Image: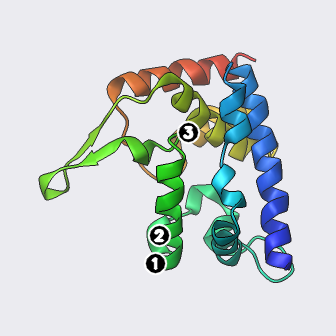
Amino acid sequence: MGRCLGFFRELIAHKWSVFRICCRLHVPWRGFWHDWDKCLPGMAKVYATVFYNERGERIGDGARPEGYDPARQTERFQGARLKHIRRGLHHWEAWVVIGHGGKLSALEMPDAYCKEMVADVASLWSTRGHVQAVRRAWSDSGYIRVLHHLTSARVECLLNQLEGG
């Protein structure tokens, strides 16, 4: 029970932060619906088990977003995460096509999902008191994002908008 309480406490704080940033980016409904599927019992249990101990405290890779590697998690978690990505189109991974030989090709993300993606990354840092470090969070988050060149340009504009206040 402690794991789930810890998970839901942080999920609510994260959703609130994403919602506030989405409002600044003029997509409040994206913020409202952000990560809705993590509230489903099966999904919540998987995430809570990976990221929280019995006392509801963060553990392991989940304690640092910049050090998180989903490939190092269990197959059960990887399956849950893949479902989450497919349900939440604000994830850049949902817009990547894997071709022959593993060649990656990115599709352009629609504006609303792009804004939600930026709000998601920004919120990970704003809940830790680093609102002005959004650009650093984006570039130093510990993994490579495969983005369409127009999506990449849009992200830059959005980061400038957020940094400007």
Type of amino acid under label 2? Gly
Which residue is at 52% across, 62% downward? 81
Q: How far across and down, in percent of the image, does residue 137 sit?
A: 61, 42
Left or right relative to 33: residue 113: left
> Does dot 2 land on a helix, a strand or a loop?
helix
Q: Which residue is mark 2?
A: 79
**Label whose residue precedes the other's in the sequence (3 or 1):** 1
Vertical order, 153 against 119 (above or below): above
Q: Are marks 3 and 1 in contact (CB under 8 Å)?
A: no
Task: Establish if 13 lies above or below 157.
Answer: below
Q: Is residue 34 above or below residue 30?
A: below
Residue at mark 3: 138
Residue linked to disc 1: 75
Q: Are marks 1 and 2 in contact (CB under 8 Å)?
A: yes
The earlier-in-sequence mark between 2 and 3 is: 2
Distance of mark 2 from mark 3, alpha carbons?
A: 25 Å
Most extreme residue toward the left, as rendered? 100
Query: Can you see residue 66?
Result: yes
Q: Is residue 110 left or right of residue 33?
A: left
Q: Position of residue 106 (x, y in %)?
A: 31, 37
Of badges 3 and 1, the one in the foreground is 1
Considering only vertical position in the picture, is 27 above or below 123?
Answer: above
Amino acid type for the residue under numbered disc 1: Glu
Dot 1: what SS?
A: helix
Residue 145 seen in the figure: no
Q: In this orientation, which residue lies closer to the viewer: 131 or 112? A: 112
Q: CA distance from mark 1 to mark 2?
A: 6 Å
The picture places residue 118, in percent across and down from the top left corner, at 59, 33
Q: Residues within 10 Å of mark 3 (few under 14, many from 20)?
A: many
Within 10 Å of disc 1 (Cα), the crowding (few <14, some 14-19, many 20+) is few
